[in-house]
Amino acid sequence: MQEKIELEHEAAKLFMRLFEKQTGIHMRHIWHNEPQQPDVSCYFDHQRLDLEIAHIYGSEEEARLILGKSASLRTLEVLHELMNIPAEQRLLSALNSILESKSRKRYHSDRVWLVLRNANPLWTRQDIEANRHLLSIPEAHPFEQIWVVGDMRGESGIVQLYPEPD
């Protein structure tokens, strides 16, 4: 559980720094929330904003590998099978799955943004932007905005998925 919280805080801080750099609007002071609340809260232009954080790995097997967990023979077999599926198709599948899952959540919060951090080194922000038109963002969801950090270190930047920028 502590590892999950640390990953969420790291993703939130990274997103806040990239968002501030891109927009010039200050985001400050994060703290972790209890269940029934989004993962992290901060101040966005002097007003409270809650962030639901999720990581995009591609598959459970890829997540284990990326997080440095031990890989069973079955995990390695699944990873080998995944190599036959084009990376773009796997990206869309992973994004659509997490968007569908998160859209069903409900929070005790007035303002919630969903922040996804891409943890899969096969994809970048550019890949996400190039395939954005193929995403299936559910019509009913609790998020004011949805963003993706393009890679684990934020080097490729952030992209807004919802509402789609003009």
Image: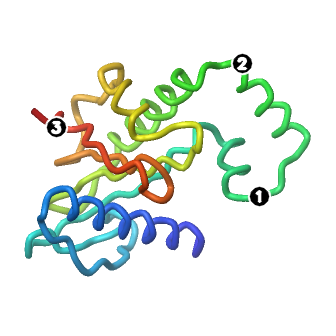
Residue designated by label 3? 163
The N terminus - image quarter:
bottom right
- Residue 84 found in image quarter: top right
| Left or right, 11 with reference to 82 | left
Q: With respect to residue 95, does 50 lie above or below?
A: below
Which one is closest to the eye, mark 3 or mark 2?
2
Asked which secondary structure carries label 1, the reply is: loop
Asked which secondary structure carries label 3, the reply is: loop
As measured in the structure, the alpha-carbon distance from the residue carrying label 1 to the one carrying label 2 is 23 Å
> Residue 69: percent from the left, percent from the top?
76, 58
Q: Say what amino acid the circle numbered 3 marks.
A: Pro
> For the point 30% across and 21% down, which residue is it?
133
Which one is closest to the eye, mark 1 or mark 2?
2
Residue designated by label 2? 84
Q: With respect to residue 70, does 91 lie above or below?
A: above
As measured in the structure, the alpha-carbon distance from the residue carrying label 3 to the one carrying label 2 is 33 Å
| Sequence order check, earlier mark of 3 and 2 | 2
Residue 69's tag is 1
